[in-house]
């Protein structure tokens, strides 16, 4: 395949995969062989506290399908969602291939697979709890998971359903953040989500489309990284004695 055809293929793939992604993407253009997107968003995805339940024990199965555990026959309990994502440099608009994106979350009952989780809700042995994926040449990735349960975080505070995320890639500060679900009633009172501005919240709230017959509910996610803007502001919240869950 010649260079021109290859470039056109990349451009089409980017549009096909991410034209719907949202929020930030207006049009695509190609410089050399790198896909570059014109964005209507200038904010990096905000950092939020890691929380105490990042996995401490390695597990063999960390693939993109969190609804199944290798070697087990049953499916995870809960409402299945597929997240189609893309990692983009917010300053240049260029897609970021080769980024490692990690997800960890509670199962449908609100319980983490973590020895220090005080929640007594039932653990779902058929849920994978943790996934690691790598972005493709268009910065794209996808995972299949379930909507996590809400869980108590002390003093009457109930954390809304959320998915923890870390992104690592050479040349960028690592990002640790959390994703939420649009219109969940607990969002408005969440002490962590509400630290963000409305514009920042918009970047971490998933809009799930469950209206497609016979298909998994779908959400698009764009993660915006910046080489120049540290993600420390959000991360430093943990040093302010704020709740971390
Ligand atoms: Fe959490």
Image (cartoon, rainbow, N blue to C red):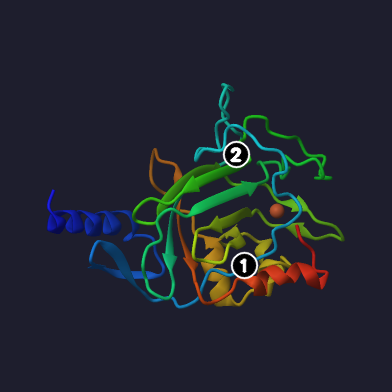
Res 138 → quadrant: bottom left
Q: Residue at x 65, y 72 (%)?
A: 232
State the SS at label 2.
loop
Query: Is 122 drawn above or below residue 35 in the view shown?
Result: above
Query: Is 40 drawn above or below residue 143 in the view shown?
Result: below
The numbered mark at residue 47 is 1
Instruction: Say few, some or many: other residues with alpha carbon within 10 Å of mark 2 (under 14 / 14 to 19 / 20 or more).
Output: some
Q: Residue at x 24, y 61 (%)?
A: 33
Q: In the visual, does 96 lie left or right of 164? A: left
The numbered mark at residue 198 is none
Q: Nearer the viewer, residue 132 or 124?
A: 132
Instruction: Say few, some or many: other residues with alpha carbon within 10 Å of mark 1 (under 14 / 14 to 19 / 20 or more).
Output: many
Q: Residue at x 54, y 45 (%)?
A: 132
Q: Nearer the viewer, residue 225 or 43?
A: 225
Q: Nearer the viewer, residue 22 or 113?
A: 113
In the image, residue 162 lies at what x, y percent? 63, 55
Q: Nearer the viewer, residue 236 or 143?
A: 236
Say if mark 1 contacts mark 2, CB within 8 Å.
Answer: no
Could you tell me if residue 90 is visible in this image? Answer: yes
Residue at the spot of label 2? 78
In the image, residue 237 lies at what x, y percent? 73, 71
Q: In the visual, does 237 lie left or right of 21? A: right
Could you tell me if residue 81 is visible in this image? Answer: no
Res 235 → quadrant: bottom right
* Mark 1 / mark 2, whichever is N-terminal: 1
In the image, residue 36 lies at what x, y percent? 31, 68
Q: In the visual, does 36 lie left or right of 226? A: left
In the image, residue 136 lies at what x, y percent? 38, 50
């Amino acid at each position: 395949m010649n260079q021109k055809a290859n470039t056109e293929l990349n451009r089409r793939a980017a549009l096909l995969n991410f034209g719907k992604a949202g929020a930030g993407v207006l049009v695509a253009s190609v410089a050399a062989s790198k896909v570059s997107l014109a964005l209507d968003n200038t904010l990096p995805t905000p950092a939020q506290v890691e929380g105490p339940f990042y996995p401490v024990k390695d597990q063999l199965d960390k693939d993109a399908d969190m609804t199944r555990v290798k070697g087990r026959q049953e499916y995870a309990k809960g409402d299945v969602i597929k997240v189609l994502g893309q990692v983009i440099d917010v300053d240049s608009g260029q897609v970021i291939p080769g980024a490692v994106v990690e997800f960890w979350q509670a199962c449908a009952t609100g319980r983490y697979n973590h020895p220090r989780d005080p929640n007594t809700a039932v653990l779902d042995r058929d849920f994978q709890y943790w996934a690691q994926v790598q972005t493709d040449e268009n910065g794209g990735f996808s995972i299949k998971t379930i909507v996590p349960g809400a869980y108590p975080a002390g003093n009457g505070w109930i954390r809304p359903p959320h998915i923890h995320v870390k992104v690592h890639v050479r040349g960028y500060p690592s990002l640790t953040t959390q994703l939420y679900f649009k219109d969940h009633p607990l969002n408005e009172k969440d002490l962590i989500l509400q630290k963000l501005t409305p514009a920042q919240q918009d970047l971490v709230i998933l809009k799930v489309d469950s209206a497609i017959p016979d298909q998994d509910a779908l959400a698009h996610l764009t993660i915006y990284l910046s080489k120049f803007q540290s993600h420390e502001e959000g991360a430093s919240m943990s040093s302010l004695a704020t709740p971390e869950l």
